[in-house]
Image: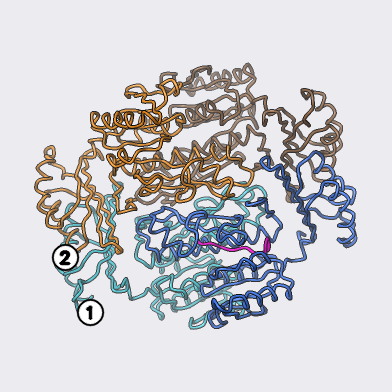
Chain colours: A cyan, B orange, C blue, D brown
C-alpha cells in the first residue's frame, strides 16, 4: 500500500498560506495527506515541508507529470524549491568502497531484504572484486577503478561518467578511503553522502579512532554527512555514539566502531531514500 | 515571541481534506502556521494533528473565544475532538509526592528557571512539610494530607476537592507512593501522570529496582504514563534506560535510577505542557 | 601477542586470601597478570574472578595440563569452580537459525573478519540451505534439520548428536524460532545462548514487536540470555534498546529491531568467547 | 558496612608480581579484598590498580598510618605511586560556580541525600549569595569572590588561600565561567575538575551549544575533565550525549544540555570520590 504513495518535498521563504495552499491543492486533486511534517527555521526564515499523500480509492493510475505541471502554479507563487515523486520509483544509488567492506556488505544485505528502497546502479571500488570474498554482489555491476595520485583525475572522471550513464541519483561513500578533488565533490554536490568514523566535528581527517584513543574520550562515534569540497565539514545527516573505556585499544575502537558506522550510514541513507532529508545551508533538516 | 503563539490539537477519523480545511481556516483568519505535525494511525484509522500558529504582524489581541466559535464549523464537519489555547496561558499543575523528593524538587527547580511553562497550584504530600528540609517551596501552597487505609477515601476526596478548587488541569504523581482507588483514577482520567521506576511493562508493582536486580537485567529504566485504574498499565508518554552491571546492588540501582526518573518525568510533563501528547486508546501520540 | 595469553575463570565462596593465593601461584609460575577483574556478590557470598595472564618473555611453550594440575592444589583449598585455557585455542560454536538470517549472517561475517575468535562447527537450520541465497557459508558444514511437532524429539536428538560429534562448546540460537524441549535445554545447560527480540522481562513469548507496538512503549530492545527450560527466563548476558515513536508500525519495529538483535547477540557471544561471562544463579557476572 | 572499607590506588611500571605482592601483603595483614580492578596500559607499559579491602571480622580499629608504613616496603620495591585511605574519611571538596546554578544545586542536593560521600568545604562564586534564591546552602560556608580582569590575580590568590585553609582535596568547577590563569591551574593540578558543556574535543571554548547548533550536529554532549592550563584539553573523566534535531534552537540545546551537564559532572565526581579515577598522562583510567 505504501508503494502507491507520492512523496513531496518543498522549501521556500516562510510566509502565511504555504500549508493552506499546498494542502488545498492536494485536496482539490483528490489526494489524502497520509503524513506531513514541516519546519520553520526562525533563524533563516526558511520553511521546509515533506508530505506523503495518496490518491483516493477509485482513482486511475496517477499522471504525475500532469500533477507536477498543475502544482507549478502553487510553487511559483511561493517561489518554492520542490520535488514530487512516486514512492514506488526507487532512487538509483551507486556504492563506493575501499578495502574495508563492513558498510558495503551491510548496505547490500539491507537492500536484499527490502530495508533500503533503492536500485543499486553499481559498486565502485579502488580494490578488485576478489577483495570481497564471499560477498554476494550478484546482479550488481562491479567496477574496479584503481587510483593513484597520478591517475586520480582520470579515475574520478570515470566515476562521474558512470554516474551519468547509470542515471545515478545518489553516490554513497561506504568507507571509500580516498580524498576527493574539489571538482568531483562539486559535480556531486548534494548527491553524495559519506560515513566518517568519528563524532564530527571531533577527530576530522585520518585515523580518527587513534586520535580518539590518544585523547582519551569516553564515547566514540560515527557521522554520515553530505560530501563537500571541505573535507569532513559537509552538512550532517545522522550521528551516533558508543561508550568505551580506558581498556579499549585503538584496535578495539576500530572493531566497535564498525557497528555504529554501519548503522549510522544505513539510517542516513534510508532517510534520504524516503525523501526525509533537505539541505539547509551548512546543516540538514531530517524529518523523523 | 513564542508567548504569542496559539496551540491547537485535534483528532478525528481519517478522511480527505482535514489538513486542507484546517489550514485554509487558519489562513483565512490571517494566521501563519509555525509548526504542524500530524499522524495517521493506519491501524485504527484515527487522525491526529498538532498545530502551532500565530497572528500576522499587525493584528490586535486575539479574541480566542470567537476564533473557537468559528472553528466549530470545521470541527463539526469532521467530528473532531479538539482544543485551542494560547501558549501564554499556562496550564495549572498539582504536584503530589511522598517521602522521596528528588522528582518533586527537580520539577520545582525546572519550573523556577523557566523550563516548565506551568502554574503550580499546590504541592500535596502524605508527609509533612518538614520532610523536605531546605526545599524552596516559597509561593506554592503546601498541603499535608496524611493517609492510612482507613482514611484513604476521605484523603482522596480532599485531593479531588483541591483539584477542583484550584482549577488544576493536570496532577503529577512525582513519586507519590500510594495506591489510588478506582474512583480517584477515574475522576482524573486523562489528567494525571505518574512516574514508575522501571522500564514498563517489566517490573510492575512494588520495589522494581529490587526485582530488576534479582532478574539480572543489564539496563534499568523509568516510565512516565497516564494513570488509569489498572496499576502501571496506563498509556506510556516517555521512557528511558540506563546501563548497569552485575556490580550494582539494589541500592545502587535506586541511586542511579533517580536520575532517569527525574528526567523521564520532566520530559513527559514538558511534552504535555506544550500540548504534544494526545491519547490514542491504550497508547499515546507524542509529537516530537 | 594476545594469542599467547591464558584465560582463567574461577568462582567460589568468598573468604580471605583467594586473590593472594591465586596471584602468588601465578607469580611463582612466572606468569604476569595482564588483566584481572573480580566481583564479590555480597548477597550470596559468592566470589568471581577472571584473570588474563601470560608467560614471561623467555619461556618455552606452556604446558597447560601440567599448570592445571599444579593449580588444583590452590583450587581445592578454596573449593573453586574454575577453568584455564589458552586464548589461542578457540571455542567451538554451533549456530542455529530459521528463516530470518540477519543474526546468522552477521555472526558469520564478524567471524570472517576476525571479530569473533571461535571455530564454527556447524550451521543448523530447520530451513534448507537455499533459504540463504548469496550467503557465504563456505567452509562451514550446513545441516538442514527440518522439524515438525511429530519429529521434534528426533530432530533435537540429531542436534545433540551433532553437538557431541563436533565437540561443540556453545550452541548459539541466532533467531532459531523453535520452542525447545526440556530435555534439550537441560542437556545444553550453560552451553546455549539465545537472542530474544524484546527487552526482557517485557514481552516474553511470541511476536514481541507486535506486543511492544500494542503497549505503546517508547523504546524497544533485545536480550541475549542463557537458555533454560523456562522460556525467556534464562540468565541475561546482554541487552540494549532503541528509541521508537508512535509513528513506527510493527513492521518498522521488526526492521529497526534487527540492528539491536545483531549487536546484542554479537556482544554477548564475544563476551562469552573471551571467558568474561560466569553464571551466578539466575543472573550472570559479565566482566567488562 | 561499606564505611569500614579501605581504598587503595596504585600505579607503577608494569612487571611480574605486582598483584601477587600486593594481595599477599593484604592477606598477611588479615584483610579481605572486596573489589579489585587493574589495568595494564600496553602502550605506555604503565600498570594501574584499585583495591577495596576490609579487615576480617574480629579486628580492632585499623591503625592506618602503621599499615601504610608497612606497605611502603612493597611500594618501594615496585616504585609505586600509591594512596591508602579509609572510605569513611570523606574527601574535602570545594564547589565553584557562577550565575547558572543547575550543577551547583544538583551537587548539593545529591550530597544531602547521601549520594556523594564528601565534605563540602566551601561554595565559592563570583556572584553574590542572593543569586541563588531559595537554594539550601545551610551549613556550607559561602564565599562571594567577584572577579574582574584587573582583580583576577588577587581573586585567584584568595581562592587558593581558601583551598589551603579549608584543607580542600578537590575543587569542582560547577559551571564556573571564568578563564583561569596558568598559575591557578598549576597549583591545583590533578585536584580540580570541570564540566564543559560540549562533547570534547568538539566545540571547545565559548558558547558550545551555539557552535553545535550552527554546525548542525545530531547529538550534543557534556564532558567532565581535569583542569589543566590548556583550556578544555585536560584529561577526560566522563562524557555523555543526548539526541537533538533540527527543530532545536540554541536555547533548546542550553535547556536540554543542563540535564547531561548535571549528570556527567555528578558521575565524574562520584568516581573521583570513590578513588576510581587515576591520571594516565593526557588521559584517565576510570575503574567501573
With C123 as the anchor, is A167 left or right in this view? Answer: left
Subunit of label 1: A
Percent from the top left, x then y, of residue C268? 62, 59
Q: Quarter-wise, where is residue B97 in the image?
A: top left
Relative height, residue A226 to residue D91 (above, below) = below
What residue do we see at 87% from left, 37% from top? D77
Judge the density around disc 2: few (<14), some (14-19), many (≥20) Cα neighbours within 10 Å: many
What residue do we see at 23% from left, 28% from top? B165
Q: Give the alpha-carbon distance from disc 2 to disc 1, as whole Å.
A: 17 Å
Q: Secondary structure at mark 2?
A: helix
For residue C192: magenta? yes
Subunit of label 2: A
In this rendering, does residue D282 appear at all? no
Where is the N terminus of chain D found, in terms of image quarters? top right
Where is the C terminus of chain D found, in terms of image quarters? top right
Q: Secondary structure at mark 1?
A: loop
Q: Quarter-wise, where is residue D282 in the image?
A: top right
Instruction: Report the span colored magenta.
Output: C189-197
Q: Which residue is mark 2?
A: A27
Percent from the top left, x then y, of residue A221? 53, 54
Query: Which comes before the other along the chain, label 2 or label 1?
Result: 2
Identify the disc placed on residue A61: 1
Between B108 and C213, the one lying in front of the other is C213
Between B137 and D265, the one lying in front of the other is B137
For residue A4: magenta? no
Amino acid at each position: 500500500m505504501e508503494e502507491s504513495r507520492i512523496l513531496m518535498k518543498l522549501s521556500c521563504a516562510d510566509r502565511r498560506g504555504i500549508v493552506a495552499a499546498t494542502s488545498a491543492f492536494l485536496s482539490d486533486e483528490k489526494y489524502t495527506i497520509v503524513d506531513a511534517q514541516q519546519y520553520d527555521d526562525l533563524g533563516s526564515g526558511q520553511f521546509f515541508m515533506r508530505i506523503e499523500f495518496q490518491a483516493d480509492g477509485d482513482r486511475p493510475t496517477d499522471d504525475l507529470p500532469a500533477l507536477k505541471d498543475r502544482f507549478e502554479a502553487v510553487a511559483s507563487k511561493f517561489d518554492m524549491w520542490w520535488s514530487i515523486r512516486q514512492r514506488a520509483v526507487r532512487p538509483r544509488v551507486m556504492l563506493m568502497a575501499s578495502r574495508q567492506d563492513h558498510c558495503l556488505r551491510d548496505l547490500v544485505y539491507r537492500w536484499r531484504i527490502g530495508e533500503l528502497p533503492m536500485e543499486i546502479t553499481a559498486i565502485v571500488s579502488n580494490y578488485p572484486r576478489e577483495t570481497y570474498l564471499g560477498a554476494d554482489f550478484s546482479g550488481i555491476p562491479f567496477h574496479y577503478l584503481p587510483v593513484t595520485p597520478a591517475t586520480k583525475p582520470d579515475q574520478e572522471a570515470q566515476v562521474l561518467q558512470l554516474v551519468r550513464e547509470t542515471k545515478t541519483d545518489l553516490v554513497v561513500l561506504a568507507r571509500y578511503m580516498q580524498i576527493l578533488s574539489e571538482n568531483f565533490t562539486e559535480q556531486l554536490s548534494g548527491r553524495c553522502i559519506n560515513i566518517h568514523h568519528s563524532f564530527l566535528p571531533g577527530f576530522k581527517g585520518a585515523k580518527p579512532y587513534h586520535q580518539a584513543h590518544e585523547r582519551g574520550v569516553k564515547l566514540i562515534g560515527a557521522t554520515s554527512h553530505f560530501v563537500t569540497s571541505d573535507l569532513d565539514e559537509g552538512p550532517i545527516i545522522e550521528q551516533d555514539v558508543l561508550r568505551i573505556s580506558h581498556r579499549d585499544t585503538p584496535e578495539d575502537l576500530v572493531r566497535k566502531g564498525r557497528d555504529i558506522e554501519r548503522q549510522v550510514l544505513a539510517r542516513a541513507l534510508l532517510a534520504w531514500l524516503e525523501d526525509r532529508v533537505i539541505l539547509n545551508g551548512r546543516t540538514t533538516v531530517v524529518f523523523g
